[in-house]
Amino acid sequence: MFDWIQNIADWFVYEVLNLDRGQHLAEALNFFIYDSTKILILLFVVIFFMGIVNSYFPIDKVKNYLSRKKLYGLEYLVASLFGVVTPFCSCSSVPLFIGFVRGGIPLGVTFSFLITSPLVNEVAIGLFVGLFGIKTTIIYVISGVLLGTVSGAILQKLKLESFLTPWVKEVLANAQRDQDIFQEEKQPFKQRLPIIWAEVIKILKGIIPYVLVGIAIGGLMHGYIPEGFFEKYMAKDNLFAVPIATILAIPMYSNASGILPVVQVLVAKGIPLGTAIAFMMGVVGLSLPEAMLLKKVMTLKLIAIFFGVVTLCIIISGYLFNSIL
Amino acid sequence: MSKSIKILGTGCSKCQSMTGVVKEVISENNIDATIEKIEDVMEIMKYNVMATPALVIDDVITIKGRIPSKEEVLALLN
């Protein structure tokens, strides 16, 4: 499907610049041109598609649905799936949290949404397809959704309502399962398109520098690190690799789009995929800036429990991947 | 009559760009309006929005969770 990009990269590097095949610089440059073109095209397609879905499923609709429907235990999975189609900005996490609590949605279900939404988002999916292919992307998406579902259910069982900050407890006490008056915008697709388009361009502009730098670093490593280099240090039977990778990932956030291309090269050079996926979930799903924001609605203890449960689930899924892939 | 514009947002970059867009529209078109930035979460929640930034014009929520274009803001203000 992407042979034509490879042809362009080959033509540019070997014909126009007249570099020799097999030379480190030539190979690194070729990899950079091929990878960045392919990934930017895929990112564009995925972000655009998700933008259309989101235009018809705004967050208020999601909230009303979760608050109104009795789902008999499936609510965690449904919240998690809604998290996939809703773009997530960590600065919206607090208003969103309060909105859900106010709508009478159980805490665990709210967590399911909050966990999956950043983990499986349009940027992560676009990068994943470009770097690891469709099969690995599907595995990532399914495990991200399950991770949100399971973590949310566990957090609900822990009965954490008493660890909310006082004013949120008050909101909780006054929670109502009534419908907010939500006048749906009855816009035809033609009117929605310019808004969706503007969003796509904005998201792309924001991440392109990170993606390009990430691919450039990846390209350099690709050309200079020998095959199988990391196998010595991070072999599958190294029990500590997954937890260490996950914990290292938590402080990294803003560079999520830059880090994935580098991780892809690490996988190509011998790091097991499960370890790499655990690392990526840590980068994308948990972040310190988000924790700081959540302090307004949760006590530190609750944030610690929340992060702890998610970290544990990420580590377990890392081990699972390593054993089945 | 002077319009009252409120921008709800916890101070992230998106909220700042929304403020920038609104300010430009107002100064370019000489619109009589006051801009107020609301960054306190409890205040924001009074408006019942779940996606920031949100643009409130004369106490009506007009845009939620995205940065509008200049043309859009101008149309909303007229």
Image (tube, coloured by chain):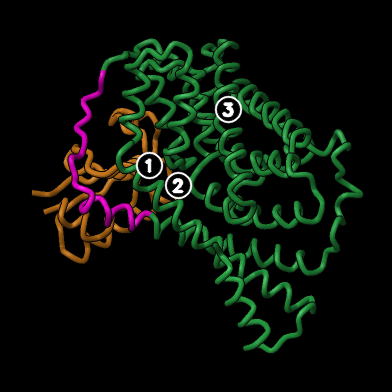
Chain colours: A green, B orange
Which chain does the residue under circle 2 lie in?
A: B
Q: Chain of mark 1?
A: B
Are the numbered discs 1 and 3 placed on the same chain, yes or no?
no
Give the quarter of the figure containing the C terminus of chain A.
Answer: top right
Q: Is residue A234 left or right of residue B5?
A: right
To which residue does mark 2 refer? Answer: B12
- Residue A192 in the magenta stretch? The answer is yes
Q: Which residue type does callout 2 highlight?
A: Cys
Image coordinates of residue A235 in percent, x first then y, are 87, 43
| Image vertical order of residue A211 relative to residue A27, above or below | above
Q: Quadrant of residue A169?
A: top left
Q: Which residues are magenta?
A: A179-199
Lateral position of residue A300 relative to residue A220, left or right: left
Q: At which x and y percent is residue A136?
A: 63, 44
* Mark 3, residue position: A146
The reply to whether the C-beta atoms of the residues labelled 2 and 1 are less than 8 Å apart is: yes
Q: Nearer the viewer, residue A285 or A299?
A: A285
Element at label 1:
loop
Element type where label 3 sits in the image: helix
Residue A18, magenta (yes or no): no
Q: What residue is pinned by disc 1?
A: B9
